Image (tube, rainbow, N blue to C red):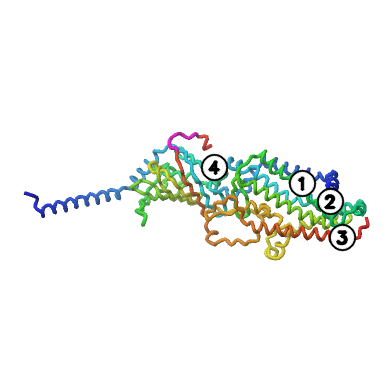
Amino acid sequence: MGIPEKGYFNLIDYMKKILFALFLLNSLLLSAQTAEEIIGKVKAKLDKVNDYEANGKMKTNVIFIKAPVANVKVYYKKPNKLRINNENGISFIPKGSVNINLSNIFINTTGFDMIDMGKEAGTNLRIIKLLPKDENADVVLSTVYIDETLSLIKKAKTTTKENGTYELEMTYGKYAGYGLADKVVFSFNTKDYKLPKGITFDYDDGTRRQEAPDKLKNKKGKVEISYSSYTINKGVPDTVFR
Amino acid sequence: MWILLQIELFKIFKRPRTYIAFGAIAAIVFLIQVALKFDGKSYIDLLLSNLDGSFEMDDEFKSKMLNGYLICFVILNTLLIQMPLLVALIAGDSIAGEANMGTLRLSLTKPVSRTEYMFVKFMASVIYTVALLVWMALLALLGSILIFGVNDMVILRSRGLEVIESFDIWWRYVAAFGYAAVALTTVSALAFLLSVFAENSIGPIIATMSIVIVFTILSEMNIPIYDRTVKPYLFTSHMVAWKGFFYMKSNAEGATITGSVENLPAIMRSLLILVIYIGLFFSTAVWVFRKKDILT
């Protein structure tokens, strides 16, 4: 005596409904994570790193600087020490580059008010704004774009009182477990650069350089660091940071 | 002709005043090196003051920037403006000095043509100019490397900065010194030409310096009417083209291209203009001298 055919299909339908309900519940639970929970998870990941020494290549893209792609070493030590060093040459390191270390955003988590801005259209990244409670803090506002399934910050914007706005874009690879990016693009504000010709005695080769209007307006500089390796939690001496 | 050239060189290097130029260069180079050794960071602060808010400018960065290559560039920037005076001291004296001493007519009694005589005189001035430049290169480049060491070089232009990697610098200096030799030879040729007209060396030397100063001022002025009409034809506008070897090309992302020169055709054009000037000054000097009635 077998299961009646109609009853068999009912059971499968029933199981499908349960699975669908579980999936929905799971999705709801995920999306129902509060900003605090998401930030907590991201911070927990970043907290695994006490220090690191990383090798990478740095590209500088600033309208008035021509510089070669440089081999750099990046040193980090908790809580907020960071140094980018071109040991074999000269590189212009932007001020505020300490912010390429994402832990810097959360140094004082209790000192922030968090505003959940929902998800970014297209990327599905969760947008959370962090407002420092301390009115004297240099940082006015930080906005982080988080991949909540991986607990990784993909983008961050930090507005400061003194040094304008910094933007970060991260691409992750094999060090994602530590919240460390394989590639960081750091955008920052620059001031115009000009020296009198009486000092530089430039050679005028006769060509008229017409600077594009958008280039003149664009006072953003970019530094891109592509990391090749990290040495994590093996200790970094304080002398590196001087 | 070789013996004649040796005699001319002997005459030049026998005179104590010839070494005034070598001494002056040594003194200027030494003073700049000492000043930058002890207070170079203030100099860097001054140059990079409007980047201070955007970039990290710690002491290590400034020490790296103050390397032998940059110091040599600063010295060249300063000295190549003064060097025409030192070059004119010898070239301006070349014919006028002989006339003044009353030895010109005697010299021309030798079995050499006036053209050959002028060529030898001019070659002696050129050798002196090159010797002066080699002396400056030794002191400014090798001396600065010994004192300050080497690193990447930051070139400061009025509208931007360029970083040249240390392994990409040497050939640029060789090219720049080579170019500077041609540039100073132009001044030498001018002084040589003026020397033909005078019977006292003071006149050609002062006249050469006056022309160089006026032309340099015109070359450095940024007045559109001069930019279009006068500047492209002044030899002083092209004398600073040695710097072009330190201006690099960059790719779309702003990264410098190793071994590149931003505008090599422009440098070659400037070089050609200087060579034309040298040819013009020298051939005019020979033409005038051949027709000249030598009385002293």
Residue range of the region highlighted in magenta in the rendering: A231-237
Mark 1: secondary structure: helix
Separation of marks 1 and 2 at Cα, in angstroms: 20 Å
Say whether residue A198 is visible. no
Q: Residue at x 36, y 57 (%)?
A: A122
* Residue to which mark 1 is pinned: B131
Q: Position of residue A169 (x, y in %)?
A: 44, 50
* Comparing labels 3 and 1, the label whose residue is closer to the camera: 3
**In contact (CB < 8 Å): disc 3 and disc 1:** no
Indicate yes or no whether the magenta region holds residue A94.
no
Task: Give, as a three-letter code, the residue at label 4.
Answer: Asn
Report crowding for label 3: few under 14, some 14 to 19, many 20 or more residues within 10 A (C-alpha).
some
Q: Which mark is residue B1?
A: 2
First reached walking from the N terminus: tag 3 or tag 1: 1
Disc nearest the viewer among 1 and 2: 2
Q: Position of residue B221 (x, y in %)?
A: 70, 59
Residue B233 is situated, as x and y percent measured from the top left of the image, at: 72, 62
Question: What chain letter is assigned to the residue under label 4?
Answer: A
Amino acid found under the numbered disc labelled 1: Ala
Q: Chain of mark 3?
A: B
Mark 1 or 4, which is nearer the eye? Answer: 1
Task: Give the mark nearest the N terminus, 2 or 3.
Answer: 2
Specify whether residue A235 is painted magenta. yes
How far is mark 1 from mark 4, CA to CA?
Answer: 38 Å
Tell me the kind of residue under disc 3.
Answer: Arg
Give me the disc on residue B290: 3
Q: Give, as a three-letter code, the residue at label 2.
A: Met
Where B215 falls versus B42 (above or below)? below
Could you tell me if residue B76 is visible in this image?
yes
Above or below A223: residue B288: below
Give the CA separation, mark 3 to mark 4: 63 Å
